[in-house]
Image (cartoon, rainbow, N blue to C red):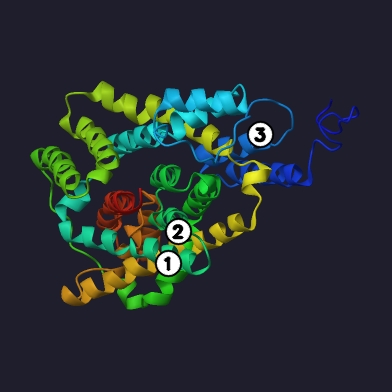
Amino acid sequence: MTGFIDFLGTLGFLQLTVGNLIMILVGLTLVYLAIKYEMEPLLLLPIGITAVLVNLPLNGIANWPVAINLPQGIEGNIFATLTYMNQHYGSPGLFDIIYYTLVKTEIVPLLIFFGLGAMTDFGPMIADPKTALMGAAAQIGVFVAMLTALAIGFNLHQSASIGIIGGADGPTTIYLTTKLAPEILAATAVAAYSYMSLVPLIQPPIIKALTSPEERKIRMEQLRPVSKREKILFPIITMIVIGLLVPSAAPLIGMLMIGNLFRESGVVERLSKAAQEELMNIVTIFLGLGVGSTMRAESFLTAQTLEILGLGVVAFASATAGGVLFGKLMKKLSGGKINPMIGAAGVSAVPMSARVVQRMASEEDPGNFILMHAMGPNVAGVIGTAVVAGVFLALLG
């Protein structure tokens, strides 16, 4: 009754399958990348090591399947779900409880959006609102990946979940996938966070292919100061307007804006700091454990997973290209005053993609400082991806 071979033959001969071994190697690879190269270590490390643990047989820490069709009326009811799963699949392990009560119910992704709001400065976008259009343009990557997924055989729910990877927003990807296509949650989450860490490698070749050295050298005027009143009104107005236009996006946008109001109000610094640090750290741990627990050989090791990882590259590349091309249009309309590279920051990998743009600008002209200009599309991309996810939920959920 070891984890290697069942000598008594009661459960079959081999306990540790070839699939388990492959997934253990995959998990160890994620751990290696997180530690050696610091690729999104806050998530890839817990995801990777959890993947190793759940693929060790007979440990009882993850007993329930991660992709099942619950009876009508149970979905979304935590207690009913736990009761049903316990009756049909036996006692839960620790990871089953984490996944079904915190991740699948969207509690963790929403709390992460709350923490992100407390960490985000929307000032650059408020100072130059037209840069928000670039954040919207970058969402084309979502639809390119979605249509490509449909073309190669994924169903509509799965395609929408794959497409949202192009927004470069891990929590939104997890939030949407748990609602529409939980059977591919592990693959979409790993793709989203892996490619987010590879933004410095994925974006520069695309930016260089679409812009000339002269365009990359364009200097932009300094942003105007943003008043405290503007920063306080922005999250309130944004939450109300988007909540009315796209109600299904209200949970994501609402938590993001509540967190941001905590930050900008200046009267709840303790709460804002707790959201940025203690709360964010705790929910990140649960997110990593919950997603990692879904990376079991029987559900993760499929041809679909490889296709999803490939589509993730398509999503990121097309999102970057869409932002840059719209930046070139805005450069023309502005009479050459806008550096088109900042459109690449429209993918919501905050602040990584904005830093990529700044680094490339500095390579062409060491005195060119456009980081704050790039932060406008960058934070707009966070809002844009959440709105797109809300639209998908409204149409498909």
Where is 375 relative to 148, above or below? above
Q: Where is residue 397 in the image (x, y as percent from the top left)?
A: 35, 47
- Name the residue located 50 percent from the left edge and 41 percent from the top edge: 69
Q: Gap in Å between the C-alphas at discs 1 and 3?
A: 33 Å
- Name the residue located 13 percent from the left edge and 46 percent from the top edge: 226
Mark 1 vs 3, N-terminal side: 3
User: Which residue type carries mark 3?
Assistant: Val
Q: Position of residue 22 (x, y in %)?
A: 73, 47
Compared across the picture, whether 198 is left or right of 232 comes to: right
Checking the image for residue 159, the label placed there is: 2
Q: Which of 59 and 194 is in front in this view?
A: 59
At label 2, counting other C-alpha atoms closer than 10 Å, the crowd grade (few under 14, some 14-19, many 20 or more) is many
Q: Where is residue 184 in the image (x, y as percent from the top left)?
A: 53, 49
Q: Name the residue under label 3.
A: 54
Q: Which of marks 1 and 3 is in front?
A: 1
Q: Are marks 2 and 1 in contact (CB under 8 Å)?
A: yes
One can see residue 203 in this view: no
User: Which residue type carries mark 2?
Assistant: Ser
Q: Mark 1 points at which residue?
A: 147
